[in-house]
Image (spheres, rainbow, N blue to C red):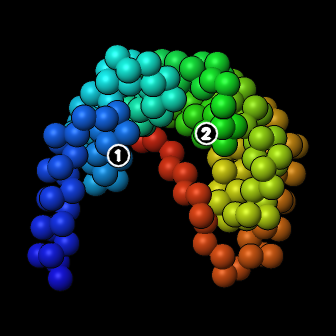
Amino acid sequence: MKLIFLVILTLVTGCASTSHTSQELNWSGNIAYDQMQYDVAKNYYEKAIQLAKSSNDTEYEAIAMYGLAKANGRLCNFKQAESLLKKSIQIRNNLSDTDNAKITQNIFELGRIYIVQKDWGMALVQYEKAVPMLEKFDMEEIDPIGYSNVLSEYSQVLKHSDASDKAKSIDSKIRELKEKNPNNKAGYVSELYSSNCT
């Protein structure tokens, strides 16, 4: 069974390496990212961005920038990740068919880049923008445990930003969500960055 999986995976990634669309290159980047092959992922995302730019596909330019930013973050290239996330957010804001959920995702990721750099003020700015967006999307009902995990990040930022009273309120909400949903698993899984990339 394992051999069959490896053969299929080789065929999928092999085909992706000769892809001719930004979507396929981005997908190959996602596969490499999920396998923690961040340098390989970077290469795919960079190619996806180039191709998206040459074909005026601004949506996939923003999507691939988001992936490239995350790969850079895993490699401790935090300034590059920050710059790419800012650009991807700017592009997304200028799209006529903007998907707010994707903007929210990008804003949270930028917040996580600031957390790992211990830039708590800028992290707070991002979480203060993005958490209300999740509330608007009813994430508490759709994915209560995923929502509680994001709130845990927000609480951490608040505690480092001299907003302990608000953090206590958020911690209370986290406990409530976990108590009400003891058997639920997170649909959206977020992961903070590590400064240990050796």
Compared to 92, does 171 lie above or below?
A: below
Q: Is residue 178 visible?
A: yes
The residue that label 2 is drawn on is 102
Q: Provide the residue designation for mark 1.
A: 27
Looking at numbered disc 2 in the image, what kind of residue is underneath it? Lys
Q: Residues within 10 Å of mark 2 (few under 14, many from 20)?
A: some
Task: Tell me the element at label 2.
Answer: helix
Kindly identify the residue that appears in the image at 41 percent across and 32 percent down: 64
Quarter occupied by residue 145: bottom right
Please tell me in which quadrant of the rendered image residue 185 appears: bottom right
| Within-10-Å neighbours for mark 1: few <14, some 14–19, many 20+ | many
**Side of 60 where 126 appears, left or right:** right
Is the C terminus in the top left, top right, bottom left or bottom right quadrant? top left
Q: Is residue 7 above or below residue 33?
A: below
Left or right of 166 on screen, residue 91: left
Question: Which numbered disc, 1 or 2, marks the residue that appears first in the sequence?
Answer: 1
The residue that appears at 34% across and 17% down in the rendered structure is 54
Q: Estimate the x, y position of residue 8 in percent, counting from the top left.
A: 18, 66
> Three-letter amino acid code at disc 1?
Trp
Q: Circle 1 sits in a helix, a strand or a loop, which is it?
A: helix
Q: Is residue 152 left or right of residue 174?
A: left
